[in-house]
């Protein structure tokens, strides 16, 4: 660990160096004034002479005294971890109080006693080493905590996604529906739901195989996602070949527009479906429902209405949008 000795007397500096050298300290820097010490520490804009762990400094220095130098060292972020021991021939409490207020951790009286200097330096450096090790462990713990938080967020994100299509899953859909239902009830705003079902999907799988079926689900999911109009609009895989969307603050007319955009987006994919009774390409049937949520009711009533509308869309020929408010 490096030590910087600051004293305007070369004899005092050499004495301290010899004492420290006998204790096994080889990395010792010497300065004859406070400005020179600050320069060696890299506080004057130039590169530091090297890392310093302990400064042993006389309080009585020409120009800038040791108290001011100590204050500058310990108040600078670069010197926050540097321990300072001051040397003084004065025992006046005002001097010592000012030194400790400036950030000194210990003091030595004059004339210097080799054993006392060696003991104080060893004690301060041991404490400094322990504090450095503790800070290193704290940094490691913070890094581990950060990584764990990142991993938990990623796990939470993944747990909310459908593994096949990459869009949100049923679990996340239920969470969003519950949140939006409560929000709409508070704000007395309409809430809309859309259910989307791929027409004749079982015949598609039977004819083209399950690998193609998985590809179809991914393509449809992406098309539905792109058809949404606002960042707050939400779509998820509802189950099997069925998808669902929740549209906050959206009335029946607006929801029908989004439903039609979804239907058209899927048809525009142009995915061949020779086994479909609805047409030569992959299409979807869409059910739309809108309610003014009642806090006393369950949000499931909205999806029940959308499901009934979806059934009507299928019964009337598929590849179409039917809203719960539409008449037969």
Image (spheres, grey):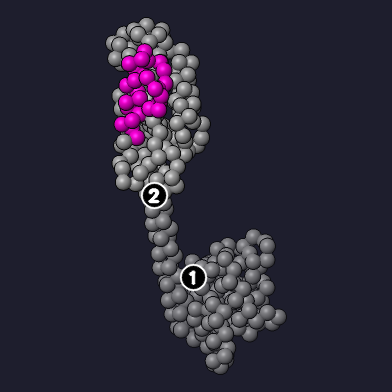
Left or right, residue 173 beside residue 270: left
Whether residue 187 is visible: yes
Is the residue marked by circle 2 packed among few (<14), some (14-19), or many (20+) residues within 10 Å?
Answer: few
- Tell me, for residue 82, which label it has, or none: none
Question: Relative to residue 191, is residue 268 depicted above or below?
Answer: above
Quadrant of the rendering where the C terminus is positioned: top left
Query: Residue sitting at 63 percent across and 79 percent down?
Result: 68
Marks 1 and 2: CB-CB under 8 Å? Answer: no
Left or right, residue 164 beside residue 24: left
Question: How far across and how far down the image is residue 249, in percent?
Answer: 47, 39
Question: Relative to residue 296, is residue 271 depicted above or below?
Answer: above
Q: Helix, strand, or loop for circle 1?
A: loop
List the residue tagged with mark 1: 25
Question: How far across and how far down the image is residue 266, in percent?
Answer: 44, 19
Q: Which residues are magenta?
A: 302-328
Q: CA distance from mark 1 to mark 2?
A: 43 Å
Observer-nearest of 210 and 86: 210
Locate residue 285: give its quadrant: top left
Observer-nearest of 96 and 211: 211
Is the residue marked by circle 1 packed among few (<14), some (14-19), or many (20+) residues within 10 Å?
Answer: some
Q: Helix, strand, or loop for circle 2?
A: helix
* Extreme residue in the bottom direction: 92
Of tags 1 and 2, which is closer to the observer?
2
Observer-nearest of 245 and 172: 245
Question: Relative to residue 129, is residue 178 depicted above or below?
Answer: above
Q: Is residue 34 magenta?
A: no
Sequence-wise, the earlier of marks 1 and 2 is 1
Whether residue 32 is visible: no
Q: Is residue 309 magenta?
A: yes
List the residue tagged with mark 2: 149
Question: How far across and how far down the image is residue 224, in percent?
Answer: 44, 25
Query: Residue sitting at 40 percent across and 40 percent down?
Result: 292
């Amino acid at each position: 660990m490096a030590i910087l000795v600051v004293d305007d007397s070369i004899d005092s500096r050499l004495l301290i160096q010899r004492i420290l050298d006998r204790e096994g300290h080889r990395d010792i820097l010497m300065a004859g004034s406070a400005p020179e010490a600050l320069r060696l520490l890299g506080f004057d804009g130039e590169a530091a002479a090297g890392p310093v762990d302990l400064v042993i400094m006389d309080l009585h220095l020409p120009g800038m005294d040791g108290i001011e130098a100590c204050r500058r060292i310990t108040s600078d972020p670069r010197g926050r971890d540097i321990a300072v021991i001051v040397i003084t021939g004065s025992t006046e409490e005002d001097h010592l109080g000012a030194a400790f207020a400036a950030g000194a951790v210990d003091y030595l009286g004059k004339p210097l006693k080799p054993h006392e200097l060696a003991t104080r330096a060893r004690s301060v450096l041991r404490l400094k080493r322990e504090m450095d090790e503790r800070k290193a462990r704290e940094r490691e713990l913070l890094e581990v905590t950060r990584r764990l938080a990142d991993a938990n967020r990623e796990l939470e994100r993944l747990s909310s996604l459908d593994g096949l299509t990459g869009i949100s899953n049923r679990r996340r859909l239920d969470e969003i529906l519950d949140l939006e239902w409560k929000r709409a009830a508070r704000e007395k705003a309409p809430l809309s739901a859309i259910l989307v079902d791929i027409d004749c999907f079982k015949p598609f799988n039977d004819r083209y195989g399950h690998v193609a079926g998985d590809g179809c689900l991914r393509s449809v999911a992406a098309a539905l996602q792109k058809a949404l109009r606002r960042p707050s609009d939400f779509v998820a895989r509802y189950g099997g070949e069925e998808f669902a969307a929740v549209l906050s603050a959206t009335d029946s007319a607006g929801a029908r527009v989004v439903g039609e955009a979804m239907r058209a987006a899927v048809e525009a994919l142009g995915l061949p479906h020779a086994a479909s009774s609805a047409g030569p390409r992959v299409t979807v049937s869409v059910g739309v429902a809108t309610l003014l949520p009642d806090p006393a009711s369950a949000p499931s009533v909205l999806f029940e209405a959308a499901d009934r509308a979806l059934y009507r869309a299928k019964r009337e020929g598929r590849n179409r949008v039917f809203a719960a408010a539409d008449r037969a």
